[in-house]
Image (tube, rainbow, N blue to C red):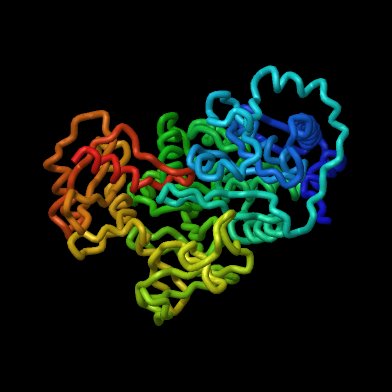
Amino acid sequence: MAQNPIRQILAFAETKPLTPAVVGTRLNLNYKTFAATVLRFASKLRAEGVRPGHVVGLKLRAELQAVAVAAVMHEGATSFGATRPIIDSFDQDIDFVITEDAGWLASPKKAIVVNADWLASLGAINHHIEPIDFDSAQSLALLVFSSGTTGIPKGVEFSIEDIHRRTDAVSKNWMQSRPFFAELGLDTVSGILAYFWSLLHGETYFLSGTSKENLQLIRDNAILSIQTSPSKLVDLVAAAGAVNARLDGLKEIQVAGSLLSTKTAHALAAISTADLQYLYGSTEAGAVAKGAYQATDPECVGLLLPEAEVKITDDLGNTLANGNNGYLNLRTPYQANGYWKTPANKNSGFHEGWFLPGDTGVLSKTGELRVTGRIDELINAAGIKINPAVIDATLMGYRGIQDLAAFGYLEPGEVHKQLGIAIVTNESISIEQFNLRLKQAVPETNHIVIFHVAEIPRNALGKPLRRQLAQAYESEL
């Protein structure tokens, strides 16, 4: 048997009951109150039929999800952040979905609906129950889905042992300055690992909310370090600008998920003296490289971390010498071995002990890594390969445009993709001037379409879902 990690949280309720456990702008629970709430929630789930080994999706607001994650684990079950594509893809493998929206599920028999009556009933529940231990340290305890930009959900498995190994690693690699705040939520690997590290070490987990709420949280709690995505950082800087606030208390800002625009970096520098850094890695392999953001070389993500390995290979899998661009292969001592309910092979991303994230890159002799694009996103425009992430970083912040994302689309009967730029704007802009800026940013091609959209679809990390944009544009051709 492997001890349930929730036992450690319950122990803190006895030894440090008044220490803040979970803090947000709408929630502040010390360890005593958090533990009691988790026990009542877990007891209710047990009565609803949740059993050890069950897989339970969570579709809840952040403050409820912070309780539900611990409650599900208390019962020896596995939780994950639920989305419509995950439910549709793995319906037969999911035992329950806990949601506040009774109409959200197509299979109501699997729903545990958390409404006002359900929450009110917790007060009358006998919460003196023991956590259920897992069969072994290798028992599945958590799923984090990594959909990337393809829209295809992939569940990364975390055993009890994995949770301990990964939280130990993140404390060294990106939580050295504390108080630490993961602006990415509990449905991301950053958020969930920050959650478990904090609660298993008797520290405080800070709940992410809106950009305005996050700004308040950072300032009220003297946060020293945050991890965020480019899109969330844009919103945070805008929230600070709206109230003429500064972020001088921050010591370090780590950006993960995609490239950062120079305009955002400059806007941040005007209100903060924090070190701006890239953190490169994946849900599957963990952190691999970290380094200072370089406006002159936005593809450079820093030096390899001591425990990480990277090799660059060609189309046939042959290892290339340092300095050559090719396919990235990652290896860390704490990486996953495969995806949930998916055979491990080269096509799945796991091959001979390496993980292939779908990125291309260059590794220097000194261990500096440049990520030059995603294989499934590179736009082969008549033989010219274009990295859309670089275009995003270059053009983001253009006057009058609120958001944008590059994508590749196919015209009927064509073989090579063309380049499109989806833009969100509430005001009239000069398309002629914007086209001139496009030609400066992307001199490789003259044929670029501008696609007006109401919103750029993004995943939990803020990465644009370029395939959805391409499908939306192609449907209009």
Pinpoint residue 60: horizontal percent, then vertical percent: 59, 32
In this figure, what is the number of numbered marks?
Answer: 0
Residue 233 relative to residue 475: left or right: right
- What quarter of the picture does the C terminus occupy? top left
Q: Is residue 149 above or below residue 302?
A: above
Residue 69 relative to residue 2: left or right: left
Q: Is residue 118 above or below residue 334?
A: above
Q: Is residue 249 visible?
A: no
Residue 453 relative to residue 357: left or right: left
Pinpoint residue 18: horizontal percent, then vertical percent: 80, 35
Occupied quadrant, residue 450: top left
Of residues 61 and 294, the one drawn nearer to the viewer in this rendering: 61
Residue 314 relative to residue 288: left or right: left
Pinpoint residue 393: horizontal percent, then vertical percent: 33, 51
Pinpoint residue 231: horizontal percent, then vertical percent: 41, 43
Give me the residue at 41% from left, 42% from top.
458
Occupied quadrant, residue 113: top right
Q: Is residue 328 above or below residue 195?
A: below
